Amino acid sequence: MRIVALGGIGEIGRNMTVFEFGGKLLIVDCGVLFPEDHQPGVNVILPDFSYIRERINDVVAVVLTHGHEDHIGGVPYLLRERADIPLVGSQLTLAFIEAKLKEHRITPKTIQVKEGDRRTLGVFDLEFVAVNHSIPDSLAVAIRTAAGMVLHTGDFKMDQFPLDRRITDLGAFARLGAEGVDLFLTDSTNADVPGFTTSEKDLAPAIDAVFRTAPRRIIVSSFASHIHRIQQIIDTAHQHRRKVAFVGRSMVRNMTIAADLGYLKIPQGLLVDFKKLERSDDHKVVLICTGSQGEPLAALSRMANNDHAIKISEGDTVLLASSLIPGNENAIYGIINALTEIGANVVHKGNAKVHVSGHASAGELAYCYNIVKPRNVMPVHGEWRHLRANSEIAVATGVEPRNVIIAQDGVTVDLQRGRATVSGKVPAGLVFVDGASVGGITEETLRERRRLAEEGSVTVLAIIDAETGTMAEPPEFFIQGFSCDPADLDKAGTAVEKALTDGPSGRQGGRGARNLDPEAVIERATANWMRRFYNRTPVITAIVVDA
């Protein structure tokens, strides 16, 4: 069996792993990665489908371990390649992806499973195991083939007191371990955190303190899929006799789905439309919205920028009930500062115990290794420090160091006769989604965008005598992103005229200049002048008009 991760190794997000056996492909998860500051204009980042594109008809199914965006967000783009690929997942996971696909006008073929189920799809024998995470209905999957058994944990932790009382099924892990797990793919996100992840129930006192002391409205920002955390907010609001409203399209959609399916329990009369809360007393109001990661178009960001129907006022309390995804720190702290400037009291992970991770810490991972006793280990879902820490835990529990593979996206790992080895590499680059464009944006495009943002742009309009190749009149400069003294621009114009008059190797007059591309000459001369006199490297565009 061949295993290749097309995303999710060396990064937090974009999770997608392909399993290949007997000429057939099984995909586990297909998520997105959210852009960082150095990727301006990008909406989301997808896995690279080029490895499977020519074999898309060999894909028997996509198994979705849970409903977070970094595991299901890429599915609409994958189904553009082939719309009838079966999607396999739990009830809530499929409900979330179906709602997302409806916006893309795609009706998927789905196969609903639950913990304990065992299904055969093509050459793959799949068994599903309950795991606890920060979203209900999460599953691990055991994949059996004639080449051996792989156990993929998905995202998980071992909360012994989860709000929905659905714990990670360690008994199933032990049973699979006794049968023989040839390759263990394990969540690495918290592998460098000692001990055990705090239980969700331990947040209750801190959340209650926020509700008990808040003098006016409480605005809670969370992931639109974090049902456990939102359940805690709803329960606490009910205890303090506050009404609750959901704000933001994705929040309303997901919470409606969760409530309809029974995963979210909302007391009768507690939930109201947020427009009606405008007429309520401030100390009786709770608003639950998106934007905990500083997303510019999310509700909380727009509130902080005074660009939303809900206006934050002095004395309001804003509760950020999610973690800081790496790369989003600047955006999140920017919003915290903006809200604080308005006069809001901002409560977040840094100053109160209002968030716990959804991922297993080092102690839990060691516990799992000792139960499963895998022959080979391949850490997944994490940055390099997480992968390395996870591999060290595996070795400390008795896995042979040569049997622990720290791969990277695109590396092919072959499982044969109980041994996993690296066998090669396939393309697995970043695929950028920019508006309606998928894959049209390259790293070169992003470099130019960053340059535009940092250095500005200069457009040079030059009227040139077609006969002589010289300027018919001084060039005009249009500057954006920085300021230039008009007198300096006259000097820049002189430099451009001189460059057009000079040839490629010294003074050769107009005849030499006519053999050159005038746009290139003007752009090069302007760039040299800007670098020398302004210490800038703006994006320069020359427009040449024949006199």
Image: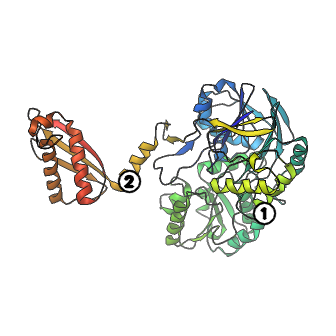
Q: How many numbered discs sit on the rendered protein? A: 2
Circle 1 or circle 2, nearest the eye? 1
Q: Position of residue 343 (x, y in %)?
A: 52, 73
Q: Residues within 10 Å of mark 2 (few under 14, many from 20)?
A: some
Q: Position of residue 406 (x, y in %)?
A: 68, 48
Residue contact at pointers 1 and 2, CB within 8 angstroms: no
Q: Amino acid at mark 1?
A: Phe
Residue drawn at x 62%, y 30% is 52
Q: Quadrant of the N terminus?
A: top right
Per the image, the residue denoted by label 1 is: 196
Q: Quadrant of the C terminus?
A: top left
Q: Position of residue 437 (x, y in %)?
A: 48, 37
Q: Position of residue 196 (x, y in %)?
A: 78, 63
- Left of 505 or right of it: where is 479? right
Residue 185 in sight from this viewpoint? no
- Left of 482 or right of it: where is 22? right
